[in-house]
Image (spheres, helix red, strand yellow):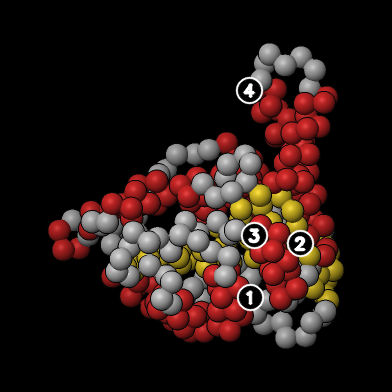
Amino acid sequence: MLDRLKIAARFLKFYWRAKTKYRVHSPFVFQFVEAVLEDDRTFYVFREAEILRGELLNSNDSIEVEDFGAGSHVSGLKKVRKVREIAASALSPAFQCAWLFRLVQFSKPLSIIELGTSLGVSTLYLTEGSPRQAQVLTLEGSKTIADLARRNFDWYYDTFLKIGLKRNNPDILDFSSYEKNIKTDFEKNKIQILVGTFDQTLQKALNQVKKLDFAFIDGNHRREPTLAYFNQCLAYAHEGTVLVFDDIHWSEDMESAWATIQSHPSVRLTIDLFWCGIVFFRHENKEKEHFSLIKAEWKPFSWGFWA
């Protein structure tokens, strides 16, 4: 992994080349910037999911976990970890989760696969941003972490969704059966956790959705596994599929994987946000396009040549 100085140097290089909305001429990419990158609105799930994040960051509980990601070469190796340590190291930051929420709102996927459930916070953002009939399959290597994520989903529902249901549906007098149906829809149709290594679960998930609309790949941060996941997803992709690769600048290995993905003949458009790379297969893009984008407020001199 690149040390902090190297990562900082990579970011400065990205920052120099990144464009703001003032230098984007592609209508589709401009729509993306306005709807995903520049939208500062706060949605209901943001507050609730961040309350959950706070609870996890302050938890004193410990669990025994298996780690199958980068850095773990011994399958089945277990160790005891504090929940707050897992939350601090594994959860995507709030602003990244907000972008994921807006991205699924923008792309409206009906099938979503997440590689790397962790404690389920990003899963909630993906789920609540997607259409109600969407199917979310999230993959987690550790059974104990998957079990904790399920409890977090239950907590989210019991604490917030029922309150929202009653507030938004004042004409319904008997909520017992109504809540049961909604909870069944939320837990069993919207979110399904598949436990095991990605080598075991990704193909199963792809076979289940049959047609992949959206994938968030945040797990094994090494070149060869990342490219393997890309190629597996590619077999189920279509013109409207969106693939999101987390931490594309996390290591030289990941930057190499990202460059290989960008060069694939099926990829027509990519967007680099530094923390992640987004892949589109749009047939409308006759020529390949690659964008590095940044919010205009993060580049305050964003006018003229500098935008």
Which image quarter holds the C terminus? bottom left
- Per the image, label 3 sits on a secondary structure element best described as loop
- Per the image, the residue denoted by label 4 is 168
Q: Earlier in the sequence, mark 4 or mark 1?
A: 4
| Left or right, 144 with reference to 118 | right
- Per the image, the residue denoted by label 3 is 210
Query: Is 247 placed above or below 213 here?
Result: below
- Per the image, the residue denoted by label 2 is 194
Tell me how far mark 3 sits from mark 2, CA to CA. Answer: 16 Å
Question: Is the residue under label 1 in contact with that under label 3 (CB below 8 Å)?
Answer: no
Question: Is the residue under label 2 in contact with that under label 3 (CB below 8 Å)?
Answer: no
Q: Amino acid at mark 1?
A: Asn
Q: Earlier in the sequence, mark 4 or mark 3?
A: 4
- Per the image, the residue denoted by label 1 is 220
Query: Is 275 placed above or below 214 here?
Result: below
Residue 194 occupies quadrant = bottom right
Q: Amino acid at mark 4?
A: Asn
Residue 57 visible to an observer of this rendering: no
Residue 232 occupies quadrant = bottom right
- Residue 4 x %, y %: 48, 78
Tell me how far mark 4 sits from mark 3, CA to CA. Answer: 34 Å
Q: Amino acid at mark 2?
A: Leu
Q: Foreground: 26 or 247?
A: 26
Q: What residue lies at 74% left-to-right and 39% top-to-bottom? A: 185
Front position among marks 4 and 3: 3
Q: Earlier in the sequence, mark 2 or mark 1?
A: 2
